[in-house]
Image (cartoon, grey):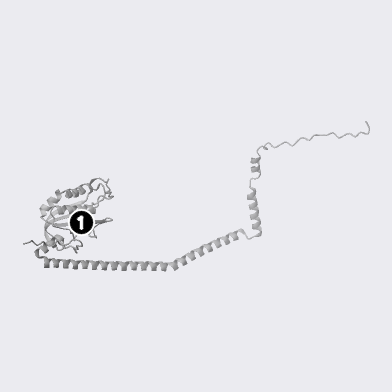
Amino acid sequence: MCGMSQQPPKRSTPERPSRPDASMSLLTNVMDHSLDDGYAEATARKEALGQSGLPKTLRAKLGLAAGLVLAALVVTVGAAQARVTAPVVAKEREELIDRIDQETESADKLEGQVDSLRGRVGEMQREALKKHGGEKGELAGVLSGAVAVHGPGVKLVVDDAKSATTGDGSGPRESNGFSDTGRVRDRDMQRVMNGLWQSGAEAISINGQRLTSLSAIRAAGDAILVDNKPLVPPYTVLAVGDGQRLSTRFQNSPDGLYLHALQENFGVRTSISAQDDVELPAAPSVIVRTAQPRAEQKGTS
């Protein structure tokens, strides 16, 4: 058995026992490395810069000072620009106000000239009627509104309701869609005027504005226009005629009942009274452009 080397016996070393939490590698990594690598790297970089650069407190002060200087610069530039542009804006505003005042004054002068010319035309018409028409001319002037008149009649006052209310579209205004049924409208005054004419009125005026056969009652927004002149409530209507009879006939007419319905249903305020004497001015001018007098036919002998 000599001469044969024996191999040392092989010993099996036992394997290192595994960790009991080996199956929870994610949780283990979180516990072992609570600080993320990125955060750790950033922290290390900041520490390195802090050791080699300026102290942190001084750097923060310099940054704050730079920010304040920048903010002050922005505010200063803005204030300077505002100071430069303010006089220009104020000047333009003053010029615009001056132009408005000038145009308003010019419009007032033109309106005064128009009224003056209308008065002159009306006076010339009245003189021509007296000169060439005699008694017939005077009667024509009364009927046409070219001359002022006075006599017994009625005084009718129509005003908006104290508190305008929104109706449901029924009643006398059923098909017009008025949003404010407590306001007097142009169509209301049209019906009132037609009712007075039909009841026997010989001459009518509204707020001092004489009506003629050529007069028109229209609306411009909420305003009522008579011959393009705006009127404001209350609307005072003067009508020459047989006072008591005219008042009774109008109130019993369909248009008078319409006005009474406005009063009862929508609060429109009305009052009518017979007057011993009312005075109506002449119409500014009566211009006929189409109608021509008919030539008198001479009879044959």
Q: Is residue 33 above or below residue 50?
A: above
Q: Quadrant of residue 234?
A: bottom left
Quadrant of the snapshot with the N terminus: top right
Q: Position of residue 201 (x, y in %)?
A: 13, 55
Q: Residue at x 51, y 65 (%)?
A: 73
Q: Residue furthest front?
A: 301
Left or right of 95: which side holds 205? left
Residue 155 lies, in percent from the top left, at 15, 56
Residue under circle 1? 235
Type of amino acid under label 1: Tyr
* Number of numbered discs visible in the structure rendering: 1
Identity of the residue furthest to the top in this view = 1
Quadrant in the picture for residue 284: bottom left
Query: Which residue corresponds to the image point at 30% horizontal and 66% vertical from the top-left?
Result: 104
Q: Position of residue 124 (x, y in %)?
A: 16, 68
178 or 125: nearer the eye?
Answer: 125
Disc 1, SS:
strand
Closer to the camera, 172 or 117?
Answer: 117
As drawn, is 66 to the left or to the right of 89? right
Q: Residue furthest right?
A: 2
Q: Residues within 10 Å of mark 1 (few under 14, many from 20)?
A: many
Q: The C terminus lies in which quarter of the figure? A: bottom left
Position of 215 with respect to 243 (left or right) is: right
Give x and y (percent) for residue 129: 13, 65
Left or right of 40 in this view: 202: left
* x 33%, y 66%: residue: 100
